[in-house]
Amino acid sequence: MDGRLDADLYPLGSGYVPEIDSVHDISAGTKRGSDELFSSCISNGPYIMNSANGNDSKKFKGDIRGPSVPSRVIHIRKLPSDITEAEVISLGVPFGDVTNLLMLKAKNQAFLEMNSEEAAQNLVGYYSTMVPIIRHHPVYVQFSNHKELKTDNSPNQERAQAALRALSSSHVDTAAVAPSTVLRVVVENLIYPVTLDALCQIFSKFGTVLRIIIFTKNNQFQALLQYPDGASAQAAKLSLDGQNIYNGCCTLRISFSKLTSLNVKYNNEKSRDFTRPDLPTGDGQPTMEHTAMAAFTPGIISAAPYAGATHAFPPAFTLQPAGLAVPALPGALASLSLPGATRLGFHPIPAGHSVLLVSNLNPERVTPHCLFILFGVYGDVMRVKILFNKKENALVQMSDSTQAQLAMSHLNGQRLHGKPLRITLSKHTSVQLPREGHEDQGLTKDYSNSPLHRFKKPGSKNYSNIFPPSATLHLSNIPPSVVEDDLKMLFASSGAVVKAFKFFQKDHKMALIQVGSVEEAIESLIEFHNHDLGENHHLRVSFSKSSI
């Protein structure tokens, strides 16, 4: 198994297929090499288009460049057959100006040229954590081996160039294509709870979220969310409509609201105004300025497939209600520049695939038990295997694909033992135990019958207490004899800086403790979850959504 690690470095679902050295002739309808790809590897020169009887065709040969070499040119695969030029361009515009487009509709592929390599890197980095869905089809994005595109004047390319001109930022009338800055969001198939903070994390990728209200209507979980500009709203709608928050459930249905603004009177779990940190918490019920809008008729859905969102997002607001777990991000690129930023990914994990490849571990400190406890916050860990010859890598098998999705979404990029975790889906469908008589130095552990599983009971309340890693930890199962100083000294003994502590007023079996950083909290949770406090009480530790 160890020898097959390289198969995991381009995990299932990433959509990566190497562009192989081959010769293609589209006009003749023949191709040698990959069945998936049109493009082949050439040197760093331009991609040159020829025209034959109105059909796109090309011939070239070249040398192979590594798949990770950035380029301004993006290769997009598995496009739906009725894709439009505008829809392809829309994938790139939130990240920068799109300077050229090559459509290969017969191959369900396209090439998109960005104005800079940085914009292309941001685009590929973002879509590696969230596979874009167009017309209910997942499409796959990777760097091309081409450094630039040069296109001719064939009818197909004239249409592409017209679409580029129409959707460039200098030609866009945002108000015409984005009827409102307010989005109406309906979450269908609500299997796992969705919070206001979770929606903020998701939608902040596309612009500053100014205000948000969540409510239930007709037995459906809904939200109203306001951006400062229509471009951000349109970019969010285009990218997120139809996406699942978790694998196979919690599907987002997004339309434009007829409201032009939200008037939020309380900052709490039901409503939030990020521009007004002074608002009271109220009674938890959001109040809207225009009560006549309470019916929330379906929003006006733009007839245009793309609103022409520009990448010039406004700066983030720095004022926020105290204790918010979600930062006000400056736009779609914010999470890309913050490796530890909490974010929910949309990388769909196929049913039956529940093994994660965890890389960039600290080989001197990592153990199977440490990964079992940490990943166990988001699901029941069945097996853990640290790879014998590459101890900075491990395989973690969760009980199902939804729990694998939760763990990957919450832990990818978080720091453990001084290094940011890198988590992807493994191609393995299970972790194999060592054969009898084969010792692997305790690097493989089976936890399938562990009493520490948090989610083994159907409908467990732990499902509603899943939160991103934070510097504040929730402690429970504290015996009456243990006092505040005992717990502060316990956590300080591991090297953590204890900043605050608070027992729950009505129940001294529970408390909150705040340490110096999220990384300290992660290591404290690993060390002290299930710690024996005496009197047959073992401490329970989880991440808290609150702060002290």
Image (cartoon, rainbow, N blue to C red):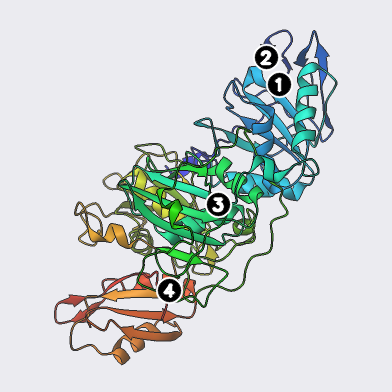
Q: Earlier in the sequence, mark 4 or mark 3?
A: 3
| Residue 404 visible (yes or no) | yes
Using the image, determine if residue 51 lies above or below residue 380: above
Disc 1 residue type (three-letter): Ser
Residue labelled with disc 2: 31
Using the image, determine if residue 314 lies above or below residue 255: below
Task: Tell which residue pokes out farthest to the left in this image.
Answer: 535
Give the number of callouts. Answer: 4
Q: Are marks 1 and 2 in contact (CB under 8 Å)?
A: yes
Q: Distance between the Cα atoms at labels 1 and 4?
A: 51 Å
Q: Distance between the Cα atoms at labels 4 and 2?
A: 55 Å
**Which is nearer the eye, 169 or 548?**
169
- Secondary structure of the residue carrying tag 3 is strand
Of circles 1 and 2, which is in front? 2
Of circles 1 and 3, which is in front? 3
Of circles 4 and 2, which is in front? 4
In this rendering, position of residue 149 left or right of residue 425: right
In this rendering, position of residue 405 left or right of residue 60: left
Q: Position of residue 348 (x, y in %)?
A: 45, 40
Residue labelled with disc 4: 521
Q: Earlier in the sequence, mark 1 or mark 4?
A: 1
Residue labelled with disc 1: 22
| Residue 58 visible (yes or no) | no
Q: Residues within 10 Å of mark 4 (few under 14, many from 20)?
A: many
In this rendering, position of residue 261 left or right of residue 448: right
- Secondary structure of the residue carrying tag 4 is helix
Of circles 4 and 3, which is in front? 3
Q: Are marks 1 and 4 in contact (CB under 8 Å)?
A: no
Q: Earlier in the sequence, mark 4 or mark 2?
A: 2
